[in-house]
Amino acid sequence: MNETIRMQILAIRESGITNMFDLPRVQKEAYTRGFYELVNYLNEHKAEYARFILTGEEDESK
């Protein structure tokens, strides 16, 4: 996860618009905001995303 994606996740979380585990809704909101990097990231990195939401930790081994 790069800094852009991290900031996009945090922006959506801070808006309170959706439950962050409702991935289709998170992707829709990301698309609406022009966060295309996050839309693509969620398609390919669901486990890493869930880890970040649950723990705030990023998988640094990749």
Image: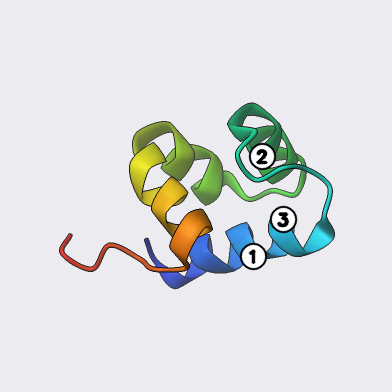
Task: Report the residue that reaches farthest toward the top.
Answer: 24
In which quarter of the view is residue 11 placed? bottom right
Q: Are marks 3 and 1 in contact (CB under 8 Å)?
A: yes
Q: State whether residue 49 is above or below residue 15.
A: above
Q: Earlier in the sequence, mark 2 or mark 1?
A: 1
Residue at x 44%, y 49% (from the top left corner): 49
The reply to whether the C-beta atoms of the residues labelled 2 and 3 are less than 8 Å apart is yes
- 48 vs 54, left or right, is left
Name the residue located 52 percent from the left edge and 56 percent from the top edge: 53
**Cα distance, mark 2 to mark 3?**
7 Å
Task: Mark 2: give few (<14), some (14-19) or many (20+) Cα within 10 Å.
Answer: many
> Residue 40: horizontal and vertical position, in percent?
46, 39
Q: Which numbered circle lies on residue 10?
A: 1
Give the label on residue 12, or none: 3
Residue 35: image x %, image y %? 63, 50
The three-letter code of the residue at mark 2 reads Val
